[in-house]
Image (cartoon, rainbow, N blue to C red):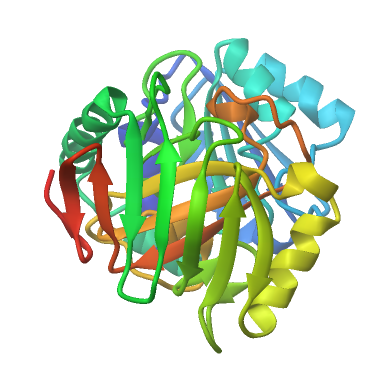
């Protein structure tokens, strides 16, 4: 068994708990067929029935799969989605989970990231993530500051944090693999301040020029400045008018094996970073059901939950 197949086995058995009497659907696209095939070949030996579904790559993160594929997803116990664009924030994924499926999404995963990200100790990641989520659950205000000038306040009172531990073992659970983050939806229409995105942006990659400065007012991004990455981010979000500018998520990475690679699947999991996303927040309990969700990753953050410092210049204190 090669390294990719071993990573596939870890994903299916350790993270998803695939059982002999269950059914498995691998949803992949033309760009990720090698990973999809590895998962399928390993998976068909571990369960009652496995199917590999290949589709054209989506155009944007959050784009819905076709209706026939969405219908198929309702019929399987375990679904793994190594795809170019994310299906995490889609109705197809949400409906499959509601039906009881355990769904692992792998947006823009590469073979290297799969091998690296799935060698982490997920019991340690789970413990760290759950502890962090408990702190967020008790908080009313999150404040993020960075040496570059980020100073962002995000009300989170009564919002339930979501623990992406990588352990998707119960019916209806969904999340990314590789994993490791605690995230939540800030209260809609209330985030205020300045955000400097200096590490990476979903769909764009690493920031190669200058950090992206985003002005946030009343829960929406209202101004972008910086290099070409800033222009690209703004153009992508403005295609969806005001809903695309919605401040959708605050996430904190908890995976000690992850590193900033320019691939958001891994970047947003890096321990010592935070990320803020814009667009769709339906999966987190919000009301903004728009066809885009873009994360921006921030390094060296200091994070306060109310008056408690939980991260100091990128060092997680929880």
* Residue found at x 17% / y 34%: 127
Measuring from the top left, give residue 318's x and y in whole percent: 13, 43
Above or below, 228 relative to 265? below
Closer to us: 135 or 100: 135
* Residue found at x 51% / y 43%: 191
Closer to us: 41 or 296: 296
Q: Quadrant of residue 246?
A: top right
> Going by the image, does 248 lie left or right of 67?
left
Any part of residue 99 in sight: yes
Measuring from the top left, give residue 130's x and y in whole percent: 23, 30
* Residue found at x 72% / y 27%: 92
Extreme residue in the bottom direction:
209
Above or below, 79 relative to 219? above
Q: In which quarter of the image is residue 204?
A: bottom right
* Residue found at x 36% / y 22%: 169
Measuring from the top left, give residue 119's x and y in whole percent: 26, 55
Measuring from the top left, give residue 257's x and y in whole percent: 25, 61
**Quadrant the N terminus occupies:** bottom left
Numbered label tally:
0
> Going by the image, does 276 lie left or right of 123?
right
Above or below, 31 relative to 130? below
Extreme residue in the left direction:
317
Q: Quadrant of residue 233?
A: bottom right
Closer to us: 299 or 309: 309
Any part of residue 54 in sight: no
């Amino acid at each position: 068994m090669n390294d990719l197949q071993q990573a596939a086995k870890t994903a299916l058995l350790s993270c998803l708990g695939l059982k002999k009497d269950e059914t498995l659907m691998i949803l992949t696209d033309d760009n990720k067929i090698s990973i999809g095939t590895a998962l399928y070949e390993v998976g068909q030996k571990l369960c009652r029935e496995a199917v590999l579904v290949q589709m054209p790559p989506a155009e944007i993160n959050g784009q819905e799969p076709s209706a026939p594929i969405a219908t198929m997803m309702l019929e399987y116990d375990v679904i793994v989605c190594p795809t170019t664009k994310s299906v995490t924030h889609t109705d197809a994924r949400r409906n499959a989970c509601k039906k009881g499926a355990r769904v692992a999404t792998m947006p823009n995963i590469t073979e290297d990231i799969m091998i690296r990200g799935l060698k982490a100790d997920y019991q340690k990641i789970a413990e760290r993530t759950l502890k962090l989520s408990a702190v967020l659950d008790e908080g009313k205000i999150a404040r993020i500051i960075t040496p570059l000038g980020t100073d962002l306040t995000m009300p989170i009172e009564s919002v339930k944090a979501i623990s992406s531990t990588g352990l998707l073992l119960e019916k209806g659970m969904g999340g990314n693999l590789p994993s490791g983050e605690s995230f939540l939806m800030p209260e809609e229409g209330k985030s205020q301040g300045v955000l400097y995105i200096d590490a990476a942006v979903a769909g764009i990659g690493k920031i190669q020029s200058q950090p992206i400065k985003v002005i946030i007012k009343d829960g929406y991004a209202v101004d972008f400045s910086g290099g070409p990455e800033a222009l690209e981010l703004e153009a992508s979000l403005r295609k969806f008018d005001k809903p695309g500018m919605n401040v959708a998520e605050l996430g904190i990475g908890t995976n000690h094996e992850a590193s900033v690679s320019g691939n958001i699947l891994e970047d947003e999991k890096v321990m010592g970073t935070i990320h803020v996303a814009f667009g769709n927040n339906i999966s987190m309990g919000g009301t903004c059901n728009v066809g885009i969700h873009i994360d921006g990753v921030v390094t060296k953050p200091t994070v306060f939950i109310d008056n408690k410092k939980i991260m100091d210049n990128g060092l997680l204190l929880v």
